[in-house]
Amino acid sequence: MRGEKIPDQHHIARLCNPKHISEEQIQATAFMLRKNEKSLSVNWTEFLNCSSRRSEIIELQNIYSRELKVAASAIIAVLNVGEVREKVLTESLDRRNLEILHDPQFNDTSHSGIYNLKDDDILIAELILKIVCETYSAHQ
């Protein structure tokens, strides 16, 4: 349901395009808003209702390839929702309370967003990068 808070024990995935990757490492800029964005686009992995992480990644690759041109070097970063919220709340200078909410789109029902970011939040982006727990190729 649109606006539903994603539980802290669940996970989100962020598609990181090559301009935010250096020497096969994701850069903090992958977790920054672009101008005029209200939230950082992510996918709620448990919403996909797959039997394993590998199945979730395959489903995300399918979603991304239907909607976007995915570069061969693009990476999917997986993060725990509770860890994202806790890390930013406890270590950001303004004790930022991020909201991670379900925001389904027509062709992507698992689409979600990280809210309460600003487009110049490099410190927040660096904190989020520190807790990426898994990475996968975004290309099929």
Image (cartoon, helix red, strand yellow):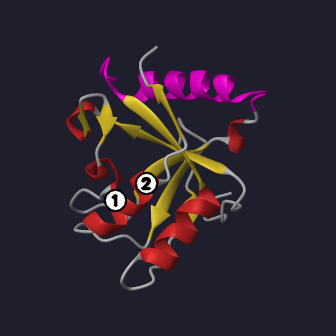
User: Residue at 64% of width from left, 29% of height from top?
Assistant: 56
**Front residue of this view, candidates 71 and 128:** 128
Seen at 28% across and 45% down, the residue is 27
Residue 99 appears anywhere in the view: no
Magenta stretch: dominant secondary structure: helix
Instruction: Give coordinates of residue 130: x percent, y percent.
Output: 43, 54
Q: Residues within 10 Å of mark 1 (few under 14, many from 20)?
A: some
Quick one: SS at disc 2?
helix
Which region of the structure is painted magenta?
A: 50-74
Residue 136 x %, y %:
49, 27
- Check disc 2 and report the residue beneath it: 130
Asked if one can make out residue 25 in the rendered structure from this viewpoint, the answer is yes
Residue 13 point in image, percent of width and height:
52, 42
In this picture, is 60 found above or below 91?
above
Q: Amino acid at mark 2?
A: Lys
Image x and y of residue 124, in percent: 36, 67
* Mark 1 secondary-structure assignment: helix
Rendered view: 107 above or below 2: above
Q: Is residue 16 above or below residue 59?
A: below
Q: Quadrant of the N terminus?
A: bottom right
Name of the residue lying farthest toward the bottom: 94
State how far apart marks 2 and 1 are (Cα). Answer: 6 Å
In percent of the image, x 45 and y 28: which residue is there? 64
Looking at the rendered structure, the kind of residue marked 1 is Glu
Label 1: which residue? 126
In magenta segment, residue 98: no
Q: Is residue 25 left or right of residue 88?
A: left
Q: Is residue 114 left or right of residue 120?
A: right
Closer to us: 48 or 57 = 57
Do tag 2 and tag 1 residues touch (Cβ < 8 Å)?
Answer: yes
The residue carrying pointer 2 sits among few (fewer than 14), some (14 to 19) or many (20 or more) residues within 10 Å by Cα, namely few
Is residue 69 within the magenta segment?
yes
